[in-house]
């Protein structure tokens, strides 16, 4: 069965319960959330998230909690060596994010590796390893996996090739808590050719190992391959193309993994219900924008 969903909001007053209901309204069986606004580290107590109510609702509608992914905020930068306070904030926040995930019953946290802030990739990678070990080494047994995301390579981002991600993995002590998120827009913008997606998976498998993949972000791209810009497009409306992305959704080597849409809203409306229907039908929808614009 295709495990497909999108980024959904944790809105007041129902938070996690509201997110599950929103996801179900899109005919999803998976979803990705942030524990608060992705642009900052302000967070409300998890006790207000309506966790028990959300779990009861998931059981009622048959939504598997294993298909929920938590995304850490963009502001976390474990690669920063120029400002110690930024690095310390990243370590502290990631540690607390693990606690929030455990309280919500979520076992996968997607994390952008970080940016080296013009200090060089080797320096940044070493700092990321230092931060991850700080967070993970101090903890007792738990089931959380931090899924480092493949990046587009804009600015001084780390993680735009598989070799960099492997270097981070090799340096972490508790490797059982490290996995990876593959983002189609990001790897396309980084220069990987999704016209032959199986060849990309072969390369990932050779360098890192497919067994370490935890999450797939499926997004089209507004950029030509190798642009290193990271601008998402709706499925089939970008430079990657609908058929190429279908080969990601329905690749048998990835059947067990959750696929998450992070595609742009259309006229301030989420397109996920319409996109998910198109993907399930395996048919490109040339009327996507019109349907979303006309939706309530």
Image: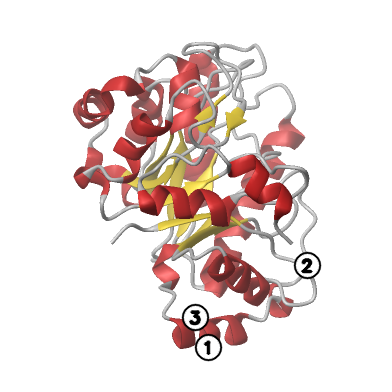
Pick the residue in front: 222 or 67: 222
Give the residue drawn at x 45%, y 85%.
59
Q: Badge 2 local density, few (<14 within 10 Å), some, or many (20+)?
A: few
Q: Nearer the viewer, mark 2 or mark 3?
A: 3
Q: Disc number at residue 58?
A: 3
Mark 2 element type: loop
Q: CA distance from mark 2 to mark 1?
A: 22 Å
- Above or below, 9 against 39 in this view is below
Q: Badge 1 local density, few (<14 within 10 Å), some, or many (20+)?
A: few
Q: CA distance from mark 2 to mark 3?
A: 22 Å
Q: Disc number at residue 56?
A: 1
Q: Are marks 1 and 3 in contact (CB under 8 Å)?
A: yes
- Above or below, 285 against 204 in this view is below
Read off the residue under disc 2. Answer: 44
- Above or below, 96 against 113 in this view is below
Q: Disc number at residue 276?
A: none
Give the image quarter of residue 209. Answer: top left
Give the image quarter of residue 212. Answer: top left
Q: Is residue 172 visible?
A: yes
Q: Is residue 71 visible?
A: no
Mark 3 element type: helix
Give the residue drawn at x 76%, y 36%.
85
Q: CA distance from mark 1 to mark 3?
A: 5 Å
Q: Nearer the viewer, mark 2 or mark 1?
A: 1
Looking at the picture, how far across and down is residue 134, in whole percent? 52, 45
Looking at the picture, how far across and down is residue 3, in whole percent? 37, 58
Give the residue drawn at x 39%, y 29%.
165
Looking at the picture, how far across and down is residue 238, in whole percent? 53, 25
Quadrant containing the N terminus in the rendered view? bottom left
125 relative to 288 in the view: left or right: left
């Amino acid at each position: 069965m295709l495990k497909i969903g999108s980024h959904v909001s944790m809105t007041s007053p129902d938070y996690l319960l509201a997110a599950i209901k929103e996801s179900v309204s899109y005919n999803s069986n998976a979803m990705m959330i942030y524990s608060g606004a992705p642009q900052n580290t302000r967070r409300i107590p998890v006790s207000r998230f309506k966790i028990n109510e959300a779990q009861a609702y998931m059981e009622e509608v048959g939504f598997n909690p294993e298909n929920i992914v938590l995304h850490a905020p963009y502001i976390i930068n474990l690669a920063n060596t120029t400002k110690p306070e930024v690095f310390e904030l990243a370590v502290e926040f990631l540690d607390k994010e693990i606690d929030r995930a455990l309280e919500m019953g979520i076992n996968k946290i997607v994390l952008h590796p970080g940016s080296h802030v013009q200090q060089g990739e080797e320096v940044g990678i070493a700092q990321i390893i230092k931060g991850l070990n700080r967070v993970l080494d101090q903890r007792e047994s738990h089931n959380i996996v931090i899924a480092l995301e493949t990046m587009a390579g804009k600015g001084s981002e780390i993680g735009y090739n598989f070799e960099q991600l492997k270097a981070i993995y090799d340096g972490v002590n508790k490797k059982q808590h490290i996995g990876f998120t593959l983002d189609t827009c990001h790897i396309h913008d980084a220069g990987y050719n999704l016209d032959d997606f199986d060849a990309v998976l072969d390369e990932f498998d050779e360098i890192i190992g497919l067994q370490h993949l935890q999450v797939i972000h499926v997004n089209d791209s507004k950029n030509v391959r190798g642009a290193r810009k990271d601008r998402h497009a709706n499925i089939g409306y970008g430079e990657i193309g609908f058929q190429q992305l279908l080969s990601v959704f329905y690749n048998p080597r990835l059947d067990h993994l959750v696929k998450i849409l992070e595609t742009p809203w259309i006229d301030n409306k989420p397109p996920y219900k319409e996109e998910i229907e198109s993907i399930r039908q395996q048919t490109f929808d040339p009327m996507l924008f019109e349907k979303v614009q006309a939706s309530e």
